[in-house]
Image (cartoon, grey):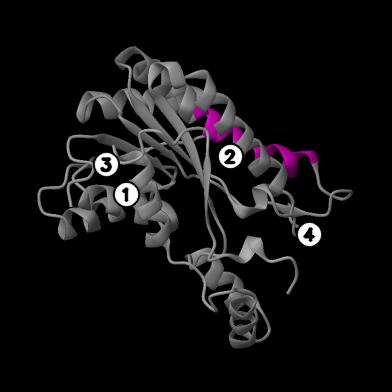
Amino acid sequence: MNRLAGKVTMVTGAGRGIGAAIALAFAREGAAVALAELDIDTARATAERIESEVGGARVLAVRTDVTQSAQVKEAVEHVEASLGPVDVLVNNAGINVFCDPLTMTDDDWRRCFAVDLDGVWNGCRAVLPGMVARGSGSIVNIASTHAFKIIPGCFPYPVAKHGVIGLTRALGIEYAPNNVRVNAIAPGYIETQLTLDWWDSQADPKAARAATLNLQPMKRIGQPQEVAMTAVFLASDEAPFINASCITVDGGRSALYHD
């Protein structure tokens, strides 16, 4: 339960879903955790839940718009003033933008990339100088199986997620000599509120859920905590030689040739 003891961690988009699960898992493993979230009320509620579940947890909620590089830099400065130098950054904040390529607006394109790719780069750029100066650090970017598998009707989301993998690999190699590791996690179907909301929006929610589960080799979808524990591993000293890599967490779904 102390795999991250003494480490200061920052998780973007940590108010709910996978981000909240990662923040809770980090706190349980002994880390001080900053929840960087656009919706500060959600972040504070999650921080309070973590404090109630993990005795002695050091938790901080900080409002952060990952699309604004100056705001991300200020958030990191605030976290470091309050908790100490950031040892681990998890770039989790993201949004789904699914459009028809030929009818998609310029605003749709910019909104997708502003959060899903620029937001990841803004986080990396804010913490890298300190990590490089200290000669240690771990960055974990939450990508998606959309980064290497294409589902029609989901444009331009997979384009941005392909970019996240490229960014992860490029930065991992660039800063390997400084003992700064940059890795990614590619979740598949995970039971977040967004998934539940999508099922509920269908004409027959039970049938929609059953159809999704039937597509999965394990006949279930993942839980946020299963992604979170992968993040714990990559953030910990147990993965010192894993760098510029991506771990897929999808129950084997992306390995299928066809259904």
Q: Is residue 145 above or below residue 136?
A: below
Q: Number of callouts in the render?
A: 4
The residue wearing badge 3 is 33
Q: Secondary structure at mark 1?
A: helix
Label 2 vs 4, first from the N-terminus: 2
122 in relation to 1, above or below? above
Residue 67 visible in the current orientation: no
Q: CA distance from mark 1 to mark 2?
A: 20 Å
Q: Which residue is mark 2?
A: 115
- The magenta segment is 106-122
Q: CA distance from mark 2 to mark 4?
A: 19 Å
Residue 220, position as x, y percentages in the image: 51, 76
Q: Which residue is mark 4?
A: 153
Nearest-to-viewer mark from 1 and 2: 1
Residue hosting label 1: 23
Front of the two marks 2 and 3: 3
Q: Which comes before the other along the chain, label 1 or label 4?
A: 1
| Amino acid found under the numbered disc labelled 2 | Val
**Labelled pair 3, 1 in contact (Cβ < 8 Å):** yes
Is 255 contained in the magenta span? Answer: no
